[in-house]
């Protein structure tokens, strides 16, 4: 096992979780969970690279030869099953699974493991049932420690700074992609390692599409523009949405904006330890429903955030997870009027003993940009 | 079905492939293959969004409500099974699979589909075997059409331009991450939509780690530096490696460099229609072996490239795929001397009737940088 902090402790914690379940084994590919448990990370790819964590005993890496030296140096793990490109991963994977899968219980797989690798594992362990590792991994990862919260705070401060800069620049006559580039540059120069995701800049009718990215559309006077972006720093992410308007808002835009703003604030105010995650969603949704806009709020209220941009806890009807100090998630109600415009306001909050602490703090006032 | 070009034709082609196999169905999540087949794409995430392509009849999208309008507008597909966040995807997926899985043959899944979604599909179709869709998808995607080749060429030209710019900047005293930022900025300003992957800038001993990214190490006089980077334009990617030296090379560095350069050139010269992919690998490997460096060439010679940075055909021992006009792949032998230095030279080539056409053309001379 590794002595590198905090990975040794996290691996012990996940093995305790496995020990309290029937599971025999956890399989994690290149992903935020590999980073969380071992410190090693890279972009996922077609070469099989997984860490196998048995319910007890040493975890094992199955690793392509060209990564082997790096994984050894970075993780301090003892067990490696190395395969070369010309051999393929089949034999190394089979040997590793045989070594660690010593009990007949189900095999848990990290959610984003590639299907190709899951199929290979299922073939190598035909007697085992396979199921999702999300409940086990979420239990650990949902509660952020002080160092993780500090990184979330830093990522949020960079996003705030980018907002202050973008609203100083002209919007009308520029494309959505140009505004997205301003956000990216501002986050980089404010110290971000990278973006958290490709920024969403949705103007005019595109603002009614919640997952529209940013395109060649030229922003016009009168447009409502949703900005939804964030950065990564030290692996941890920020995520913020603000809605601005080019010129004077109509009464309708003002009314919808005020309703979303109030729904978001009520939801943030409802955050405290012991409250079920779904309750935060209910607060935002009830307010928008009472404003006659409930059927135009077509997504959940939020998602957890950390090493991943979306992770548990999800702030959605049916999620009865009780909020605990250290949990971090977005609160982002939105209203979408098809073909016309949309409004979304989002901050990430971290649960503290006394309530939700926002990681982004720039104004919720409806700003008029040029 | 969609009439949007070229997606209707590609879907017809993939259905012909399915028709010639026992497969009942193809499942593709948010990935380059979804983009290739339908034109729709986004970053993969935890919300289930898949297209199901039956061996005959209409394909169906299973789509989260907040994407539904966008997918309809972008693809022109008729069949949608929409699910809302508060419902979860279970029922929509089950209904869609029931609708399209009309024969008992195996279900093919795209390689990068998330394990979570594969497990859900397996649960919904307990009587079906599941296997990899890579052979079917690769057969279509490997041969690039003229428009795809043009995009590969444009992406290569941008990478060339970034190389010309980076070697004009000082290396010694700057960190690897700073050099990586120069490459990223140069590609952006030369017209790239994005990077193809996070650039590798590996200096000194780190150059002996083939998949080392770029870190805080400050480049010193005498260092060998491997630059491995590329960009995306119109979805298609470039990938280039060059090795430079800060100051005069030692005899050993010169000898290794010349061997890698010769191995790479011989491999490129061996490219022509009808040659098996593994033969290109053999040519590079035999030359390095004859130079006494074969055991330090610890990866395959190359990988296909297109919408993905790594895709078939892989240039590796055992791959008997016969090269055809339109196939595109990297040729990138390397030598890695642990703890000391490494050398890699890489160009992407496209197979033409008369041989391999390089997409990047900046010099293979060993350049001395400041």
Image (tube, coloured by chain):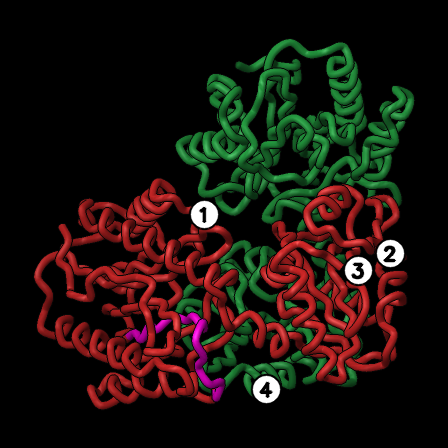
Chain colours: A red, B green
How far, Cα to Cα, is label 1 from label 4? 39 Å
Which mark is nearer the camera, 2 or 3?
3
Of the image marks 2 and 3, the number of the one nearer the N terminus: 3
How far, Cα to Cα, is label 1 from label 2? 34 Å
Q: Is residue A309 left or right of residue A349?
A: right
> x%, y% of residue A3?
70, 56
Q: Secondary structure at mark 2?
A: helix
Residue corresponding to mark 3: A60
Highlighted range, magenta: A320-334
Q: Are marks 2 and 4 on the same chain?
A: no
- The chain identifier of the residue carrying mark 4 reads B
Q: Are marks 1 and 3 on the same chain?
A: yes
Q: Is residue A358 left or right of residue B325?
A: left
Marks 2 and 3: CB-CB under 8 Å? no
Q: Is residue A156 left or right of residue B93?
A: left
Q: Nearer the viewer, residue B22 or A367?
A: A367
- The residue drawn where x is 84% and y is 45% is A84
Residue B95 badge: 4
Q: Nearer the viewer, residue A199 or A216?
A: A199
Residue corresponding to mark 1: A194
- The chain identifier of the residue carrying mark 1 reads A
Q: Secondary structure at mark 4?
A: helix
């Amino acid at each position: 096992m590794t002595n590198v902090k905090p990975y040794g402790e996290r691996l012990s914690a996940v093995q305790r979780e496995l020990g309290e379940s029937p599971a025999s084994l956890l399989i994690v590919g290149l992903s935020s969970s590999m980073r969380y448990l071992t410190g090693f990370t890279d972009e996922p790819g077609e070469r099989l690279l997984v860490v196998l964590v048995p319910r007890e005993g040493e975890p094992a890496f199955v690793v392509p030869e060209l990564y082997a030296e790096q994984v050894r140096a970075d993780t301090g793990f003892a067990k490696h099953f190395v395969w070369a490109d010309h051999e393929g991963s089949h034999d190394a994977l089979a040997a590793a699974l045989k070594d660690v899968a010593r009990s007949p219980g189900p095999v848990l797989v990290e959610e984003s493991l590639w299907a190709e690798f899951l199929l290979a594992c299922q073939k190598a362990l035909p007697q085992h049932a396979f199921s999702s590792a999300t409940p086990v991994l979420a239990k650990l990862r949902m509660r952020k420690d002080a160092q993780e919260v500090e990184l979330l705070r830093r990522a949020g401060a960079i996003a705030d700074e980018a907002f202050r800069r973008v609203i100083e620049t002209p919007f009308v006559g520029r494309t959505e992609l140009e505004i997205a580039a301003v956000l990216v540059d501002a986050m980089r120069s404010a110290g971000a390692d990278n973006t958290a995701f490709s920024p969403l800049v949705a103007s005019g009718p595109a603002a009614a599409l919640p997952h529209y990215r940013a395109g060649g559309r030229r922003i016009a006077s009168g447009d409502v523009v949703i900005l939804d972006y964030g950065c990564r720093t030290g692996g941890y992410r920020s995520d913020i949405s603000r809605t601005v308007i080019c010129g004077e808002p109509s009464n309708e835009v003002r009314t919808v904006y005020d309703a979303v703003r109030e729904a978001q604030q009520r939801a943030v105010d409802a955050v405290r330890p012991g409250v079920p995650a779904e309750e935060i969603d209910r607060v935002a949704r009830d307010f928008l429903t009472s404003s006659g806009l409930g059927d135009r709020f077509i997504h959940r209220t939020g998602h957890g955030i950390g090493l991943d941009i979306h992770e548990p806890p999800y702030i959605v009807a049916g999620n009865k997870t009780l909020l605990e100090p250290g949990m971090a998630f977005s609160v982002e109600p939105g209203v979408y009027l098809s073909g016309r415009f949309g409004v979304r306001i989002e901050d990430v909050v971290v649960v503290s003993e006394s309530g939700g602490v926002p990681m982004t703090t720039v104004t919720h006032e409806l700003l008029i940009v040029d």
